[in-house]
Amino acid sequence: MPEAFVAFLPVLGRLCLGGAFVFAGLRNLGNIPALSDALAQRGVPAAKLALMAGIGLQCVAGALFAAGFLTAYAAAALVVFLVAATAIFHNFWDHQGLDRSTRINGVVANIALAGSFLLAMAHS
């Protein structure tokens, strides 16, 4: 493989991972009523405030990670976000059938993302 391409891979990886969180955070801005209702139903206090904090964390930490600034801190913040979001939104234990399977897939995806960030922290 050409050396320039290999050298660019970490940059591309940061752009993909961090950019996905920025994109998700911006998408969540369009779903504030539904998401804050879901948080409230799950017993999260100050649901709208918690949602706005989560969206802010997604966007800021995602952008920092993508840009390569404070990557270990951004990665750690996104791991914390993933743990909280997974426990709140992917509660497969409360569901059956296809909905349960979909939520289990969300848990597995979030575990993979958290693992990617932990690897990035180890290499930063």
Image (spheres, rainbow, N blue to C red):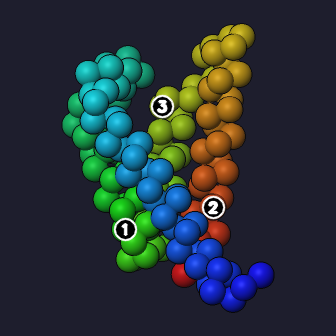
- Of the two numbered discs 1 and 3 on the same chain, state the one appearing first in sequence: 1
- Of the two numbered discs 2 and 3 on the same chain, state the one appearing first in sequence: 3
Where residue 8 appears, as percent x and y from the top left, is: 58, 79
Marking on residue 116: 2
Give the Cα separation between the discs numbered 2 and 3. 21 Å
Which of these two is toward me, 96 or 28? 28
Residue on which disc 3 sits: 88
Marking on residue 120: none
- Where, quadrant-wise, is the N terminus in this rendering? bottom right
Q: Secondary structure at mark 1?
A: helix
Q: Are marks 1 and 2 in contact (CB under 8 Å)?
A: no
Query: Mark 3 is on which residue type?
Result: Ile
Tell me which corner region of the image, top left, top right, bottom left or bottom right, holds residue 50. Answer: top left
Q: Secondary structure at mark 3?
A: helix
Which of these two is toward me, 94 or 19? 19
Is residue 40 something one can see in this rendering? no
User: Please, is residue 26 above or below residue 94 in the view?
Assistant: below
Marking on residue 64: 1
Query: Mark 1 is on which residue type?
Result: Leu
Where residue 106 appears, as percent x and y from the top left, is: 62, 34
